Image: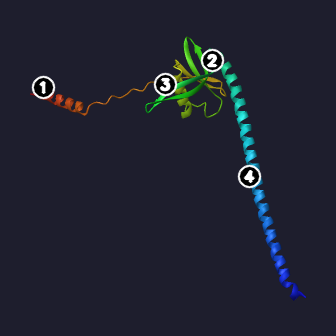
Amino acid sequence: MSGRFEPWLRQLMYSEARITLLWVVIAMASGALLYGMLASWLGASRRRWKARRRSRVAIEGEQAAIALLEAYGYSIVATQCSKTWHIEVDGAQRAIALRADAIVERHGRQFVAEIKTGEMATQLETAATRRQLLEYLVAYQADGALLVNVPRKTVHEVVFFEPRIRQRRHPFVLLAWIVLTAVLLWLLLR
């Protein structure tokens, strides 16, 4: 009997193996898809939580900074002061939107204040912080720039010195000085 049913049994086992393999592949693909969707949802939730936390820290930091500026003797003119700054690039004008954290005054001078709450951003060694202060100083045409370090409860007045532009001398100027000196020495020693 086994001889008569053997091809049928072999075919049945072969088709069951195919079906099992198909179910394994479907299960793995479904698992990978489910994992991807779950990872994406968790990542988005984490980013939203971080954004809300950053926003809350910024709002609390700004409130603390305003009180700190007033304690240092500055009067608040405006907060979150928006401005459109026009620059020209290759002959074409561009409008750049800016928003300074605060415009303050003290002793008749007006300052643009940048409020920082993070560890790295409060350091003037951070290039982005220096560039932002310099950009605000120029764009808002203030008398000075302030860096408000909320974690350390300090206010720093930052002064940018104008660079001294070295004037290039014509190469023949040095040669003329050498010739003139040689002629004068020859006349004196004659």
> Which of these two is toward me, 97 or 161?
97
Residue under the point 75% across and 41% down = 45
> Which of these two is toward me, 118 or 23?
23
Query: Would you name the residue on which mark 1 appears?
Result: 188
Q: Tags 3 and 1 in contact by the CB under 8 Å rule?
A: no
Q: Tags 1 and 2 in contact by the CB under 8 Å rule?
A: no
Q: Secondary structure at mark 3?
A: loop
Residue under the point 75% across and 59% down = 29
Q: Secondary structure at mark 1?
A: helix
Amino acid type, callout 1: Leu
Residue 40 place in picture, x, y as percent? 73, 47
Query: Would you name the residue on which mark 4 appears?
Result: 36
Give the label, 1 or 2, closer to the camera: 2
Amino acid type, callout 3: Phe
Few, some or many residues within 10 Å of mark 4 (<14, 14–19, 20+): few
Measured Cα–Cα span from mark 3 to mark 4? 50 Å
Query: Would you name the residue on which mark 2 appears?
Result: 78
Query: Would you name the residue on which mark 3 appears?
Result: 160
Measured Cα–Cα span from mark 3 to mark 1? 49 Å
Q: Earlier in the sequence, mark 3 or mark 4?
A: 4
Measured Cα–Cα span from mark 2 to mark 4? 47 Å
